[in-house]
Amino acid sequence: MALAMSNFGQDVSLFFIEDGVLQLIKQQTPDRIQHKAYHKAFGALTFYDIDNIYVCQKSLLERSLTSSDLCIAVTLIAPDQLATLIGNHNQVMVF
Amino acid sequence: MILHKVSTSPFADQSLLQSLKRKQPTDKLLLIQDAVYAMMKSDVTEMLLTHRPIYVLSEDVQARGLKIENDLYQAISYPEFVALTLECNQVISW
Protein backbone atom coordinates (compact mmCIF):
# COMPACT_ATOMS: atom_id res chain seq x y z
CA MET A 1 0.00 0.00 0.00
CA ALA A 2 2.76 2.43 0.98
CA LEU A 3 4.71 1.63 -2.17
CA ALA A 4 1.61 2.06 -4.33
CA MET A 5 0.77 5.44 -2.78
CA SER A 6 4.34 6.59 -3.28
CA ASN A 7 4.08 5.65 -6.97
CA PHE A 8 1.26 8.18 -7.23
CA GLY A 9 3.51 10.89 -5.88
CA GLN A 10 2.07 10.99 -2.38
CA ASP A 11 4.31 11.75 0.59
CA VAL A 12 4.08 8.64 2.73
CA SER A 13 5.15 8.06 6.33
CA LEU A 14 5.16 4.72 8.09
CA PHE A 15 4.65 4.31 11.82
CA PHE A 16 5.49 1.08 13.62
CA ILE A 17 3.98 0.84 17.10
CA GLU A 18 3.21 -1.93 19.62
CA ASP A 19 3.65 -5.43 18.08
CA GLY A 20 4.09 -3.76 14.69
CA VAL A 21 7.75 -3.13 15.56
CA LEU A 22 8.28 -6.92 15.49
CA GLN A 23 7.84 -6.81 11.69
CA LEU A 24 11.20 -5.06 11.47
CA ILE A 25 13.33 -7.62 13.32
CA LYS A 26 16.45 -8.74 11.46
CA GLN A 27 17.12 -12.36 10.52
CA GLN A 28 13.51 -13.46 10.29
CA THR A 29 13.04 -16.75 8.38
CA PRO A 30 9.29 -16.77 7.58
CA ASP A 31 9.78 -19.57 5.02
CA ARG A 32 10.10 -21.88 8.06
CA ILE A 33 6.32 -21.51 8.50
CA GLN A 34 5.47 -21.01 4.80
CA HIS A 35 4.98 -17.26 5.17
CA LYS A 36 6.03 -14.60 2.68
CA ALA A 37 9.30 -12.83 3.52
CA TYR A 38 7.83 -9.39 3.17
CA HIS A 39 10.23 -7.88 5.72
CA LYS A 40 12.69 -7.93 2.83
CA ALA A 41 10.54 -5.31 1.09
CA PHE A 42 11.30 -2.77 3.82
CA GLY A 43 14.74 -2.30 2.32
CA ALA A 44 13.06 -1.05 -0.87
CA LEU A 45 11.17 1.77 0.86
CA THR A 46 13.97 4.25 0.40
CA PHE A 47 13.94 3.63 -3.39
CA TYR A 48 10.27 4.65 -3.34
CA ASP A 49 11.23 7.90 -1.57
CA ILE A 50 9.62 6.71 1.66
CA ASP A 51 12.14 8.03 4.15
CA ASN A 52 9.84 8.87 7.04
CA ILE A 53 9.85 5.57 8.89
CA TYR A 54 8.98 6.06 12.53
CA VAL A 55 9.27 3.49 15.28
CA CYS A 56 7.90 3.87 18.80
CA GLN A 57 10.86 3.74 21.17
CA LYS A 58 8.70 2.59 24.08
CA SER A 59 7.33 -0.35 22.07
CA LEU A 60 10.92 -1.40 21.27
CA LEU A 61 11.98 -1.06 24.90
CA GLU A 62 9.05 -3.18 26.13
CA ARG A 63 10.24 -5.93 23.79
CA SER A 64 13.92 -5.66 24.83
CA LEU A 65 14.81 -4.42 21.34
CA THR A 66 17.02 -1.58 20.14
CA SER A 67 17.25 0.03 16.71
CA SER A 68 20.27 -2.23 15.99
CA ASP A 69 17.92 -5.25 16.06
CA LEU A 70 15.95 -3.82 13.12
CA CYS A 71 16.53 -4.54 9.44
CA ILE A 72 16.33 -0.91 8.27
CA ALA A 73 17.30 2.56 9.52
CA VAL A 74 14.38 4.20 11.31
CA THR A 75 13.54 7.34 13.29
CA LEU A 76 12.72 6.59 16.91
CA ILE A 77 9.86 8.56 18.44
CA ALA A 78 8.41 8.91 21.94
CA PRO A 79 4.75 7.90 22.43
CA ASP A 80 3.60 11.53 22.74
CA GLN A 81 5.25 12.44 19.43
CA LEU A 82 3.01 10.03 17.55
CA ALA A 83 -0.11 12.16 17.94
CA THR A 84 1.73 15.28 16.78
CA LEU A 85 3.20 13.56 13.73
CA ILE A 86 -0.12 11.95 12.77
CA GLY A 87 -1.64 15.40 12.98
CA ASN A 88 0.60 16.44 10.07
CA HIS A 89 -0.95 13.84 7.76
CA ASN A 90 -4.18 14.08 5.77
CA GLN A 91 -5.00 10.37 5.66
CA VAL A 92 -4.20 7.69 8.22
CA MET A 93 -4.59 3.97 7.59
CA VAL A 94 -4.12 1.33 10.26
CA PHE A 95 -2.90 -2.20 9.50
CA MET B 1 -2.47 -33.41 32.86
CA ILE B 2 -3.53 -30.67 30.46
CA LEU B 3 -1.52 -29.09 27.65
CA HIS B 4 -2.23 -25.35 27.55
CA LYS B 5 -1.51 -24.16 24.02
CA VAL B 6 -1.27 -20.38 23.59
CA SER B 7 -0.96 -18.82 20.14
CA THR B 8 -1.33 -15.03 20.55
CA SER B 9 1.17 -12.35 21.56
CA PRO B 10 1.10 -11.40 25.28
CA PHE B 11 1.63 -7.79 24.13
CA ALA B 12 -1.68 -7.93 22.24
CA ASP B 13 -4.07 -9.86 24.48
CA GLN B 14 -4.55 -11.64 27.80
CA SER B 15 -4.65 -15.28 26.63
CA LEU B 16 -1.30 -16.24 28.14
CA LEU B 17 -2.08 -14.62 31.51
CA GLN B 18 -5.56 -16.15 31.53
CA SER B 19 -4.19 -19.62 30.83
CA LEU B 20 -1.58 -19.24 33.58
CA LYS B 21 -4.31 -18.47 36.11
CA ARG B 22 -6.00 -21.77 35.27
CA LYS B 23 -2.92 -23.94 34.99
CA GLN B 24 -2.23 -26.72 37.49
CA PRO B 25 1.42 -27.28 38.51
CA THR B 26 1.48 -30.60 36.64
CA ASP B 27 0.03 -29.08 33.43
CA LYS B 28 2.24 -28.14 30.52
CA LEU B 29 2.41 -24.87 28.63
CA LEU B 30 3.25 -24.58 24.93
CA LEU B 31 3.73 -21.28 23.10
CA ILE B 32 3.17 -21.29 19.34
CA GLN B 33 2.78 -18.62 16.62
CA ASP B 34 2.86 -15.05 18.02
CA ALA B 35 2.80 -16.37 21.61
CA VAL B 36 6.55 -17.02 21.28
CA TYR B 37 6.99 -13.22 21.62
CA ALA B 38 6.43 -13.87 25.35
CA MET B 39 10.19 -14.55 25.47
CA MET B 40 10.76 -10.80 24.92
CA LYS B 41 8.45 -9.69 27.71
CA SER B 42 10.42 -9.61 30.95
CA ASP B 43 7.45 -9.43 33.36
CA VAL B 44 5.82 -12.44 31.65
CA THR B 45 9.08 -14.38 31.71
CA GLU B 46 9.27 -13.70 35.44
CA MET B 47 5.73 -15.04 35.94
CA LEU B 48 6.58 -18.16 33.94
CA LEU B 49 9.62 -19.03 36.08
CA THR B 50 7.57 -21.22 38.42
CA HIS B 51 6.03 -23.10 35.49
CA ARG B 52 9.20 -24.37 33.83
CA PRO B 53 9.83 -25.77 31.35
CA ILE B 54 7.88 -23.61 28.93
CA TYR B 55 7.77 -25.24 25.51
CA VAL B 56 8.10 -23.04 22.42
CA LEU B 57 7.65 -24.22 18.85
CA SER B 58 11.06 -23.98 17.20
CA GLU B 59 9.74 -23.15 13.71
CA ASP B 60 7.77 -20.18 15.05
CA VAL B 61 10.76 -18.88 17.04
CA GLN B 62 13.09 -19.05 14.04
CA ALA B 63 10.55 -17.59 11.61
CA ARG B 64 10.23 -14.49 13.79
CA GLY B 65 13.99 -14.00 14.06
CA LEU B 66 14.02 -14.66 17.81
CA LYS B 67 16.61 -16.45 19.92
CA ILE B 68 16.08 -18.38 23.13
CA GLU B 69 18.11 -16.53 25.73
CA ASN B 70 16.62 -18.07 28.89
CA ASP B 71 16.83 -21.80 29.71
CA LEU B 72 13.29 -21.49 31.03
CA TYR B 73 12.18 -21.89 27.41
CA GLN B 74 12.59 -25.22 25.67
CA ALA B 75 12.35 -25.35 21.88
CA ILE B 76 10.44 -28.28 20.43
CA SER B 77 9.83 -29.47 16.86
CA TYR B 78 6.48 -30.31 15.27
CA PRO B 79 6.91 -34.08 15.94
CA GLU B 80 7.68 -33.26 19.60
CA PHE B 81 4.56 -31.06 19.66
CA VAL B 82 2.50 -34.06 18.52
CA ALA B 83 4.14 -36.27 21.16
CA LEU B 84 3.29 -33.67 23.80
CA THR B 85 -0.40 -33.68 22.83
CA LEU B 86 -0.43 -37.48 23.15
CA GLU B 87 1.29 -37.32 26.53
CA CYS B 88 -1.39 -34.98 27.92
CA ASN B 89 -5.00 -35.98 28.58
CA GLN B 90 -6.47 -32.81 27.15
CA VAL B 91 -5.32 -29.88 25.05
CA ILE B 92 -6.73 -26.41 25.62
CA SER B 93 -6.15 -23.93 22.80
CA TRP B 94 -6.30 -20.50 24.40
Image (cartoon, coloured by chain):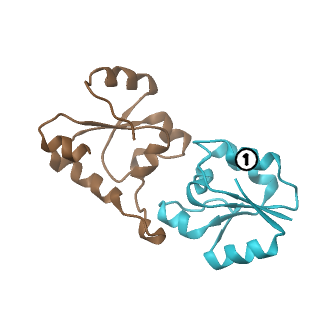
Chain colours: A brown, B cyan
Q: Secondary structure at mark 1?
A: helix
Give the left or right position of residue B68, taking residue A81 as reference.
right
Look at the picture and state if B46 lies above or below B74. above
Q: Nearer the viewer, residue A6 or A22?
A: A6
Q: Quadrant of the N terminus of chain B?
A: bottom right
Q: Position of residue B68 (x, y in %)?
A: 60, 62
Quadrant position of residue A80: top left
Give the left or right position of residue A65, taking residue A46 as reference.
right
Residue type, mark 1 in image: Glu
Look at the picture and state if A37 lies above or below B34. below
Residue receiving disc 1: B46
Q: Nearer the viewer, residue B7 or A75?
A: B7
Q: Chain of mark 1?
A: B
- Residue drawn at point x = 68 percent, y = 42 percent: B43
Within-10-Å neighbours for mark 1: few <14, some 14–19, many 20+: few
Q: Is residue B33 visible?
A: yes
- Residue drawn at point x = 62 percent, y = 51 percent: B38
Quadrant position of residue B55: bottom right
Q: Nearer the viewer, residue A54 or A69?
A: A54
Q: Is residue A29 visible?
A: no
Q: Position of residue A19 (x, y in %)?
A: 49, 44
- Residue drawn at point x = 57 percent, y = 42 percent: B12
Q: Position of residue B7 (x, y in %)?
A: 62, 56
Q: Position of residue A94 (x, y in %)?
A: 38, 36
Look at the picture and state if A47 lies above or below B81. above
How many labels were placed on the picture?
1
- Residue drawn at point x = 26 percent, y = 25 percent: A89
